[in-house]
Image (cartoon, grey):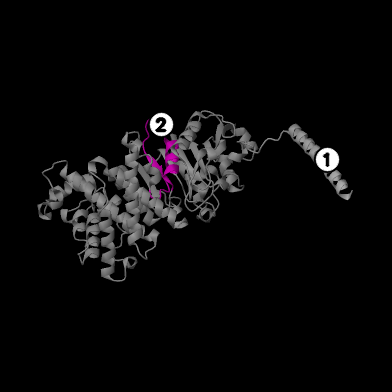
């Protein structure tokens, strides 16, 4: 059964990538993702909304109803529940029917997207819906220089997405749409290099981070990512949400406008209703949101590596509640610890945070050393995990995961070296964490196991003596995999070889004597 499902998924992925690759023409792949993902999203919310309206009543065929039958009461009720409204004529299936022959396709789409977004105006969902289609610019010259060219390319994308078989919506479409989205975004990131990869966390790494943050908690109030990118890290906890382990949903902030829109789309695509997520646009370090929502029981994050920030150029920041306790700000050229301190400030007394970090922050001196001192002296560092290199798109760096907690029972810090060959599978372009690798790391973390060459727990006093160095390699002995040489056997072999050489020389001397004879 699983193999059949995997085969179907692979075929779906092949078709999706073909749409993206075949119809984009001269459009850059990373730019063109907006049109493919936007169309996929448009189809999803159309079918999701249709499914909601019909409510399993086979006598109702919403797509074939006239817009005129929609009363203000119907529209109001539906918008309050779903967060938006789509008239029958605006549904993806009806636009797709005539996509190839509609001379006004680009303007019709623009009007529909505007109408869907504005349907939320004045409702609680307005913040979550507004601007969702902002990056789906149907008038963009990237689609072509003439209206005809634009329409031809838009129609190709629409018909391509229409051809995808997601089966019955209520049975499996939610999972497939979300999976399709993740497949697309990961492929775009992989092919775009740094421009795409800098804010995409591979699913396997996201899964590990979410597992670490949630481990051992029977329920959490909500989960938060202060640099959420396209939302993939948050969504790794969706199963816990479905099982009612996460009570109040998903929260995140993202500085990049395009990625912010993708994150909100991603929430909808995974069938998380508008009232169960809140994603904000803005600079987390300078203009943090959700101060009134904290503290959070679970925090996950892969903040940008060593980016510039205002730091000490803003004298008010040293008095900020997030940074003041440490007594020093992260360096202006390396904001990593600014994100760490932000996370710590938002973390509840019972919660746990798991953050992807650049390795340099764990051993460099100066302000970063002072921040490490604050973290260690206050016993906030639960575990530091070193991961294999080449896991992320756009960088081969072997990153670390920093796990923070405010409820540790002893004054020790765990170090796990999960960078070795036993913890990843080598693939063509990137190394990959398989489920068994993730399971093993989580097991070692949860049990606080002492594993030779892999994991150990160190007294915080010893870390202090070591200048608050938190590098895993400083505490976990590396296994010497060089061949062990038996010196006695080696000497015996050398002696035997010398004997053979002497014997050969004697034989050669005899032969020469005979020849000279």
Residue 255 in view (yes/no) = no
**Residue 341 in picture, x, y percent from top left:** 49, 44
Tag in front: 1 or 2: 1
Residue at 19% of width from left, 60% of height from top? 98
Q: Between 62 and 294, which is closer to the camera in this rendering?
A: 62
Q: Which residue appears at 32% of the width and 61% of the height? A: 23
Please provide percent x and percent y for residue 464.
Answer: 62, 37
Identify the residue under disc 2.
Answer: 217
Q: Residue 254: x and y, percent?
A: 40, 51
Crowding near the residue tagged with mark 1, few <14, some 14–19, many ≥20 C-alpha atoms within 10 Å: few
**Label annotation for residue 502:** 1
Please determine whether, in this image, residue 496 is positioned above or below residue 228.
above
Residue at left offset 13%, top offset 52%: 64
**Does the segment drawn in magenta span residue 29?**
no
Q: How many angstroms separate mark 1 from mark 2 (CA)?
A: 74 Å
Q: Is residue 218 magenta?
A: yes
Q: Is residue 141 visible?
A: yes
Secondary structure at numbered mark 2? loop
Q: Work out whether mark 1 precedes mark 2 in sequence or the reverse, and give the earlier one.
A: 2
């Amino acid at each position: 059964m699983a193999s059949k499902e995997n085969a179907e998924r692979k075929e779906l992925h092949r078709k999706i990538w073909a749409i993206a690759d075949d119809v984009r023409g001269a459009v850059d792949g990373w730019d063109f993702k907006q049109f493919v993902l936007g169309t996929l999203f448009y189809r999803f919310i159309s079918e999701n909304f249709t499914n909601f309206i019909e409510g399993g009543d086979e006598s109702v065929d919403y797509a074939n109803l006239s817009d005129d039958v929609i009363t203000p009461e119907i529209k109001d009720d539906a918008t309050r529940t779903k967060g938006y409204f789509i008239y029958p004529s605006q549904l993806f299936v009806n636009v797709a029917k005539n996509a190839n022959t509609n001379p006004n396709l680009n303007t019709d789409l623009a009007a529909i997207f505007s109408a869907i977004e504005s349907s939320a105006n004045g409702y609680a969902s307005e913040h979550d819906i507004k601007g969702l289609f902002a990056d789906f610019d149907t008038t963009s010259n990237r689609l072509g220089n003439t209206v005809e060219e634009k329409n031809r390319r838009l129609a190709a994308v629409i018909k391509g997405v229409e051809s995808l078989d997601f089966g019955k919506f209520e049975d499996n479409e939610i999972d497939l749409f979300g999976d399709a989205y993740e497949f697309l975004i990961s492929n775009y990131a992989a092919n775009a290099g740094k421009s795409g990869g800098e804010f995409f966390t591979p699913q396997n790494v996201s899964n590990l981070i979410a597992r670490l943050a949630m481990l051992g908690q029977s329920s959490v109030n909500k989960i938060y990512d202060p640099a959420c990118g396209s939302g993939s890290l948050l969504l790794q906890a969706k199963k816990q949400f479905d099982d009612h382990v996460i009570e109040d949903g998903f929260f995140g902030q993202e500085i990049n406008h395009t990625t912010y829109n993708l994150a909100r789309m991603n929430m909808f695509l995974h069938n998380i209703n508008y009232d169960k997520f809140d994603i904000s646009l803005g600079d987390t370090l300078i203009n943090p949101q959700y101060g009134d929502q904290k503290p959070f029981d679970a925090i996950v994050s892969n903040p940008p590596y060593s980016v510039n920030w205002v730091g000490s150029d803003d004298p008010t920041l040293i008095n900020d509640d997030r940074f003041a306790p440490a007594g020093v700000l992260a360096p202006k050229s390396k904001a990593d610890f600014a994100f760490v301190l932000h996370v710590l400030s938002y973390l509840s007394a019972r919660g746990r945070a798991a953050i992807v970090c650049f390795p340099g922050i764990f051993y460099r001196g100066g302000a970063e050393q002072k921040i490490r001192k604050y973290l260690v002296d206050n016993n906030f560092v639960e575990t530091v995990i070193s991961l294999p290199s080449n896991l992320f798109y756009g960088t081969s760096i072997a990153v670390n995961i920093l796990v923070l907690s405010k409820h540790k029972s002893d004054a020790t810090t765990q170090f796990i070296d999960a960078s070795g060959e036993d913890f990843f599978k080598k693939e063509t372009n990137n190394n990959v964490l398989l489920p068994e690798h993730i399971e093993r790391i989580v097991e070692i973390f949860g049990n606080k196991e002492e594993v030779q060459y892999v994991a150990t727990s160190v007294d915080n006093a010893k870390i202090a003596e070591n200048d608050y160095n938190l590098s895993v390699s400083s505490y976990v002995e590396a296994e010497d995999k060089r061949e062990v040489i038996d010196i006695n056997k080696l000497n015996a072999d050398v002696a035997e070889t010398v004997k053979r050489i002497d014997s050969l020389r004697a034989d050669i001397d005899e032969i020469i004597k005979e020849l000279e004879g």
